[in-house]
Amino acid sequence: MARVTLADVAAHVGVSVMTVSNVVNGRLGRVSAPTAARVQDAVTALGYVPHGAARSLAARRTHLVGLLLPTRGTSLLGSPHDQTLVGALEVTLRRHDHHLLLRGVETAADVRDSVQRWSLDGIVVLGFTDDELATLDLPRGVPTVVVDAHDDAPGRGHVRSDDHEGGRLAGAHLAALGHRDVVLVGPLAGGSRVVAARLDGLRQGLGGGDVTALDAATTYDAGVAAAPRVLRDHPGATALVATADTLAAGLCRGLADAGRRVPGDLSVVGYDDAELARCVTPALTTVRQDVARKGEAAARLLLGAIGGAPGPRTEHVHVDLVVRASTAAPRA
């Protein structure tokens, strides 16, 4: 089937190609309302679809947004959190006629190549620690939104949960149950201010209890591997708080493999309230954040920056606590 062109629409309506171009590119002030309506009707009737490359040349914009992710392992989107967030990000961008390009990057050269090769209008950065972000040397002239990390460069947009409050809710819940010796398990390396905020909140919520931290990646396998380290290095701990539900599920598995019961011997709290939290046994007590809203917020902030709108540059997503079967009072 031959592609319908601007000339085909113009001939159908009996106007110039420039008139049709003005209508399909939103320059309606240059066309009378009746003529614009006739052109729109013809566009629908003939099935005309604007040519993306031609529109980009005319507008000097590609309508492409790059999602930059770390190239760890074999999957760019290995966690339920990332999958939900990226789904909401893509849908929101698509509704505003922008398209998402996923790119795994490791170095500043990878970032420059992605931005220049695809002439990206904007960037969303997900999954990097603060220290890793510093090595990427994100371009100052390209609108950028950072998710779940901190970048102090002027003009950056940021989206993250209320991390301090999330930690505080977990600590207060465990304190009310009688726990006094708690371990936070999560990615401590990399200078993550997100994890630091959760740790500070956990200490505040627990009150005068003892809170220590153990480094682990936010994956199921990392949780399985971390469980015996907890038992060895923190034998007095009665509760664990993980920085992701996938990590918490792995901790539960690892504790079971070591002959420990959850919550009989140790309570476990997750973070996110992914679907996984309801599916594992025992079901996870967890700090719930609206992950889809984080994706929508990242898209909204980025589109605003691309369009030159001032608007807020940081958005915190509300959190609350969901109590399930993985937490209980410590054994006397």
Image (cartoon, helix red, strand yellow):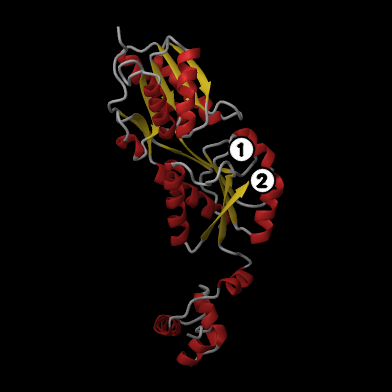
Q: Position of residue 309 (x, y in %)?
A: 54, 53
> Does residue 308 appear in this view?
no
Disc 2 residue type (three-letter): Leu
Circle 1 packing at 10 Å, graded few (<14), some (14-19), many (20+), is some
Identify the residue shown where x is 51% and y is 19%. Answer: 213
* Circle nearer the N terminus (2, 1): 2
**Residue 107 higher or lower than 209, as above or below:** below
At x 61%, y 34%, the residue is 130
In front of the other: 1 or 305: 1
Q: Give percent across and percent down for residue 56.
A: 60, 69
Q: Residue furthest top?
A: 332
Amino acid type, callout 1: Asp
Q: Residue at x 37, y 39 (%)?
A: 274
Between residue 259 and residue 98, name the one nearer to us: 259
Alpha-carbon span between mark 2 and mark 1? 9 Å
Q: Which residue is label 2 attached to?
A: 138
Helix, strand or loop status at disc 2: loop
Q: Relative to residue 264, is residue 191 drawn left or right?
A: right
Left or right: where does residue 95 sit relative to residue 143? left
Residue 131: which quarter of the image? Answer: top right
Specify the label residue 117 is tagged with: none
The answer to whether the residues at label 2 and label 1 have Cβ atoms under 8 Å apart is yes
Q: Residue 297 placed where, x, y %? A: 46, 47
Say above or below: 310 vs 180. below
Q: Which residue is mark 1?
A: 151
Which quadrant would the C terminus be assigned to in this image?
Answer: top left
Give the side of residue 206 with respect to residue 142, left or right: left
Residue 133 can be seen in this image: yes
